[in-house]
Image: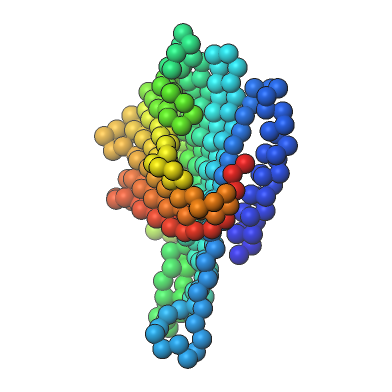
Amino acid sequence: MKKFLTMVFLAITCLSNAQDKQKNDSIDHWTSKGKFSLLISQTAFNSEWLGGGTSNYAGNVVINYDINYKKELVEWDTKFLIDYGITKNDNQEFTRKTNDRFEINSIIGRSINDSNWYFTGNLNFRTQFDKGYIFGEDENGNETRTLQTEFLSPAYTNFGLGIQWKQSDQLKVNVAPLSGRFILANDKFTTTPGYQDGDFFGLDQGETVREEFGASLNGIAEFDLMKNISVENILNLYSNYLEDPQNIDVDYTFNLNLKVNKYISTNFTFQAIYDDNAIKGFQIREVLGAGLTYEF
């Protein structure tokens, strides 16, 4: 619960800073915009309820914040994606995460002959805020949990040089054929008894850094499906030239926002990740909720 409240405080801080920054946007070529969503749900049953069910609560904080710089032929776009959610059932000992994401995408480019094409340098950083666990039971039926991930373990840093086609801030594709990637982790995940090379996101035994060199593609497409209904698509692809280049890492996120009024909206998020260094298959995440939304 403390992590969730911390995320709410972070969102309020971003709102305050954004208000101050917007006053100077027209002077220094900087612009910014963002969206804050707070989704909360709670279900309760008394002891006489015969229909079955488990009392629980859940909360989710989403922050989507863009900072853009434009002067003559140079543009610099940075997007922050923050997502954290928890749930707690009365019959479970531990609170569980439902979402946990911290990601920064930054691209700086220079227009080619004042066109929609740009020479670019890009940076992507991705990790999670909180510890992640695998849950189970011991021989006595008591709930157990085993640490699987934590802040900066793993952490992905990707940077590259390439070219971008950009029609607007809402529609752009960047291709970087020269792209380096580092996967970072605490050595406690790669030195445990029985650890085999590659067990933790491709890191060898005892290593804290995995180095890769390859190509990346990043694309964003945002549009209004109809009045008060907006769609956002974010796609990241990566191929490692040094090892199994045919196994392309995929990270795709689909966001659907149904706006009720200025402060209330319904949000649906679908995310699919394929990374064969982590697991041989797709990781799928879905979130559906209604709650408070504020654009700044």
User: Which of these two is toward me, 1 or 231?
Assistant: 231
Give percent across and percent down for residue 133. Answer: 47, 62
Q: Quadrant of the N terminus?
A: bottom right
Q: Position of residue 186 (x, y in %)?
A: 53, 49
Q: Residue at x 39, y 50 (%)?
A: 270
View extreme (left): residue: 246
- Residue farthest to the bottom, as pictured: 48
Identify the coloring. Answer: rainbow
Q: Quadrant of the C terminus?
A: top right
Depicted 114 relative to depicted 121: above or below: above
| Residue 26 relative to residue 50: left or right | right
Q: Can residue 198 be seen at all in this image of the molecule?
A: no
Residue 137 place in picture, x, y as percent: 41, 75
Judge left or right: residue 109 versus residue 224. right
Q: Nearer the viewer, residue 41 or 295?
A: 295
The residue lying toward the viewer, choosing from 139 and 165, is: 165
Residue at x 46% of width, y 8% of height: 113
Q: Is residue 67 above or below residue 165?
A: below
Q: Is residue 1 above or below residue 228?
A: below
Given residues 73 and 128, the one toward you in this image is 73
Residue 164 in the image: state x and y as whole percent: 42, 22
Residue at the spot 48% in from the left edge and 11% down from the top edge: 114
Residue 210 horizontal side relative to residue 16, left or right: left
At a point 47% along the width and 59% down the height, the residue shown is 289
Q: Is residue 100 above or below residue 226?
A: below
